[in-house]
Image (cartoon, grey):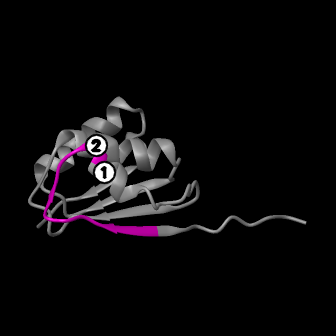
Amino acid sequence: MSATRVHQSYVVEQPRLVGSRASAAERLARLPRIEVGTVYLRCEHMEAASQSFADETVAQVLCSRDTRRLVVIAPTPRFARHLQGASLRRGVADRLEVTLRL
């Protein structure tokens, strides 16, 4: 008998302003461990986010939960740079996808 792994996806909406590591951890606390899934981080309404928030988001999603991919939709250019830097430092840049705002 063989087991089939099902791809799971989760969408996390980001508020207008986000700041600390604690707020990132709190916002992502309900996500399960989803090794075969994708987390979509929707940032269309975001105006500002700190580097520590970006680092903790990468740590929580790609490192702690071993999620296959983190897809970030419409972040500010600065937040996108913070996420890319965090993913490079943590060795998970190949699992981060960023779609910038138009």
Examine the rendering and report whether any part of residue 72 can be seen: yes
Q: Which residue is mark 1?
A: 24
Secondary element under disc 1, as helix, strand or loop, is helix
Left or right side of 45 for 21: right
Q: From the viewer's perspective, is residue 92 above or below residue 74?
A: above
Residue type pointed to by label 1: Ala
Rendered residue at 53%/61% (across/down): 37
Q: Which quarter of the figure is the C terminus placed in?
A: bottom left
Q: Nearer the viewer, residue 14 or 71?
A: 14
Q: Picture quarter containing residue 1? A: bottom right
Q: Where does the magenta region start and end?
A: 10-22
Looking at the image, do the residues carrying marks 1 and 2 touch, with CB atoms under 8 Å apart?
yes
Is 76 inside the magenta-drawn segment? no
Rendered residue at 17%/69% (across/down): 44
Is 11 inside the magenta-drawn segment? yes
Residue type pointed to by label 2: Arg
Q: x, y (%) of residue 13? A: 28, 68
Secondary element under disc 2, as helix, strand or loop, is helix
Left or right side of 95 for 83: left
Q: Nearer the viewer, residue 33 or 3?
A: 33
Marker disc for residue 21: 2
**Which residue, as the protein is rendered here, is positioned at the far top?**
89
Q: From the viewer's perspective, is residue 67 above or below residue 56?
A: below
Q: CA distance from mark 1 to mark 2?
A: 5 Å
Q: x, y (%) of residue 34? A: 56, 58
Examine the rendering and report whether any part of residue 83 can be seen: no
Q: Nearer the viewer, residue 52 or 73?
A: 52
